[in-house]
Image (cartoon, rainbow, N blue to C red):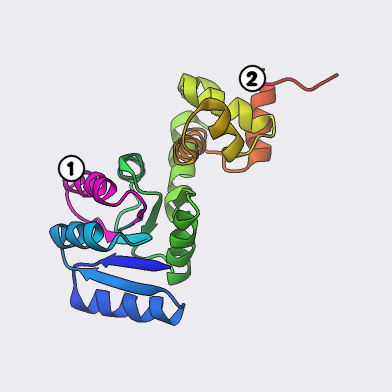
Amino acid sequence: MQVLLLQKTNIGRGALRHLLEQRDVQVVAEARDASEALEQAGRLKPQVALLDLDMPLDEARNLIGRISEVSSRTRQVAMCGTSDRGRALAIIDAGVLAYVLKLDPFEQLMEAAESALRGEVYLSAKVAAADDAAEADEHEGTPSIAMLSGREREVLQLLADGHSSKKIASSMGLSLKTIESHRLHISSKLGIRSIAALTKLALQEGLIRLDP
């Protein structure tokens, strides 16, 4: 895996590079700020960009979008200091495939990078847990598909019918990344992670029916 590393501090960059290289990850470039990261991404077009996005949200969105423009092959992973659900979803919507916390174990960063390389969405377990708690408080433990948009309900119906994300993307004419993003939003809004539990809810609310 060829990686671009954006980390603001020399110590942080050095430590991450050391850990990554121990896992046979090739760090092809390092950047101290957004402008350096953008230049390196356009010039080297790495497979994965590990990005310290502790910056104003508009700046983070702009960087994500511009990296996508100069290197469409580069999968982006956000490394952030906050587990705020709204910020995490906004950054994922901007185009990153994975969101991890700086306090997460290094193994989770590797899982995020590998997931992104495969084109799959990855969300820090701590952010997911915060989502579950927030949704439970907001909806008093009674999730409903009424919380979902029309497109999200369509994706949920296909998931509950046993279709894979890849098959759903093909049938709906959307990218796999878009479907994975919809799945993340569905799970976040409903406070439900497992396909089995999502299927049960779809059955309860009449979104799907069992064959007689």
Quadrant that contains the C terminus? top right
Kindly identify the amino acid type of the residue bearing the numbered disc 2: Leu
- x 74%, y 20%: residue: 209
Q: Which segment did they paint magenta?
A: 51-77
Give the quarter of the image for residue 158: top right
What residue is rendered at 46% in x and 36% in y? 175
Q: Position of residue 37 (x, y in %)?
A: 20, 61
Q: Is residue 5 magenta?
A: no
The numbered mark at residue 207 is: 2
Q: Which residue is mark 1?
A: 58
Q: Is residue 144 visible?
A: no
Q: Residue sitting at 28 percent across and 67 percent down?
A: 5
**In this view, 10 is above or below 129:** below
Q: x and y percent of residue 191 in the render?
A: 52, 38
Q: CA distance from mark 1 to mark 2?
A: 37 Å
Kindly give the residue lying farthest to the front in the view shown.
43
Whether residue 56 appears in magenta in the rendering, the answer is: yes
Residue 95 screen position, x and y as percent: 33, 44
**SS for callout 1:** helix
- Comparing 172 with 145, the one in front is 172
